[in-house]
Amino acid sequence: MPLVQNVPFFCIMLSMLSGTVSSVLPGKWARRLNTAMLTLVIAMSGWLLLYLVTSGIGSYTYMMGHFPAPWGNELRVGVLEAVMALFFSVIMLLSLLGGRKKLAGEVEGSKHNIYYILCNLLLSSLLALVYTNDLFTAYVFVEINTIAACGLIMVRQNGRCIEAAVRYMIMSLLGSGLILLSICMIYDLTGHLLMENIRQQVSAIMAAGTYRIPMLIMIGMLTVGLAIKSALFPFHSWVPDAYGYSTVSSGAILSSLVSKGYIFLLFKIFYRVIGFQYIADSHILNLLFLFGLCGMIFGSVSAIWEKDIRRMIAFSSVAQIGYIYMGLGLGTKAGVIAAVFHVLVHSATKSLLFISAIGLTDVSGGSRSFFELTGSGYRNRAAGVGFLVASLSMVGIPMFSGFVSKLLFAEAAVLVPNWKLLPTLIVLAVSTVLNAVYFLKTVVRIYTPANREEVQQKGYFTLKFPEQKLYCVTVFLFILVNLILGMASQPIIGLITEGLHHFA
């Protein structure tokens, strides 16, 4: 076995080991270890992706400990998994770098190492959800992900954060319970936990025509559980407070990565565990399609009425999650490709929005009110440009990543040979208009010149480049990622298409 095939195992264990070591380090060294670990994981993930693309093997199975089932555990690695692992690691590193200076004022110094422990564990769980080929292992890391995410919300230790963490934990545990019950049913019906083995037994059960009702119940519970954890409408009630009141890096990570890990796991279960054709026959995709459409509208309408910029961005996430489920609900390969691409787009753009928003509020007396943000794009130029680029992407302006994903959704809808064409195109158009209303309204506000006397009276200030080098570099890199997704999307779409070919 080539050394490069060990990369997924190395990445998962390295992030877990870093979390353990960080527990005995001071905050400064825990931060350095986290940065070094993320950089190494990015490098190894890039190496793995290059190997998979150039070798032409498509995918392979990594047997941990060289023990077969049922005693052993497996990782399944393909092009799509490598793309996701690389992208998740990059976004987490940039999110932590963008919020590094704010962390000192948001979290007590004695808890900085705890913060990085949670980030390391969160990364390990995301990588495990991407790579694992064992359903119960996936559940274990779902719980690690839940606990780490909850800790990232409440580490700030104020009333709103604790309330948000409790609400998040209640909803997440409800989803986890449904997932665990469905895994128990799968094991009872098939006698296996490895995904390929389950798939073979499910095919046999479907061919025999037995246990159809238990299978349908199991698929429904599993789908609803992961929908709750990924904040699909109407299971999104925890989102505004969790994203809006946590630290800036936590908000960026939670909105861009945590929910996407659950969505990717759902993709794997649909393709690799149950079989996409059986999922389509169960009509569960029709429900996901309808909830996705509702989320696109409801999330956008809620964002329009918000006066707090971070809660507005949080409600926007509800709408964007709706896009992903709408694409999945189309039930075609083109729809799934569009949904996977939008996972990348939303991850990069939402993090940029949160990082930019904190830069705008910092130069506005810490206020999140739209009225107080007047002229903030001039007082913090890096944040203003970052918010502008992310807003144009979310609206779907050409050259930016959001335009490509919306175009893919529209193309996928045209290829659907059933009733879903018209609702998809109508809701896409309406959602785009609503996106323009609240994002461009904010852009106009931050670039409207403020009254000088009022600015001086309130103590607002202007940040210069030397005072925020790291922040400016982070925003620039986020913008670069967005432009790559928007202007060099074809190779990325090609990787997604190839990855889906070997996904089942």
Image (spheres, grey):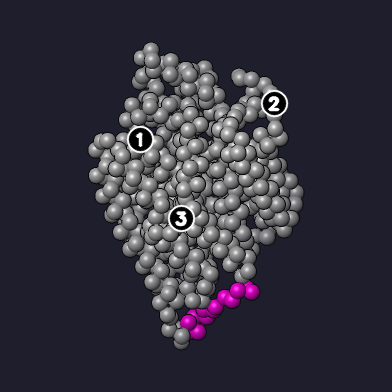
Q: Where is residue 70 in the image (x, y as percent from the top left)?
A: 60, 19
Crowding near the residue tagged with mark 2, few <14, some 14–19, many ≥20 C-alpha atoms within 10 Å = few
- Amino acid type, callout 1: Gly
Q: Magenta part of the protein: which range? A: 455-467
Secondary element under disc 2, as helix, strand or loop, is loop
Q: Residue at x 53, y 56 (%)?
A: 481
Q: Residue at x 29, y 43 (%)?
A: 414
Q: Residue 65 carries which label?
A: 2
Identify the residue position indicated by label 3 in the image.
486
Q: Position of residue 450 (x, y in %)?
A: 43, 80
- If you read the primary sequence from the N terminus, does the residue marked by circle 3 or circle 2 appear first? 2
Q: Which of marks 3 and 2 is in front?
A: 3
Q: In this view, does 293 lie above or below 199?
A: below
- Amino acid type, callout 2: Gly
Q: Residue at x 52, y 25 (%)?
A: 195
Q: Is residue 139 above or below residue 394?
A: above
Q: How far apart are marks 3 and 2 (CA)?
A: 42 Å
Residue nearest the viewer, comparing 320 with 222:
320
Q: Nearer the viewer, mark 1 or mark 3?
A: 3
Secondary element under disc 3, as helix, strand or loop, is helix
Identify the residue position indicated by label 1 in the image.
331
Q: Assess whether mark 2 and mark 1 are in contact (beta carbons under 8 angstroms).
A: no
Q: Distance between the residues labelled 1 and 3?
A: 25 Å
Crowding near the residue tagged with mark 1, few <14, some 14–19, many ≥20 C-alpha atoms within 10 Å = many
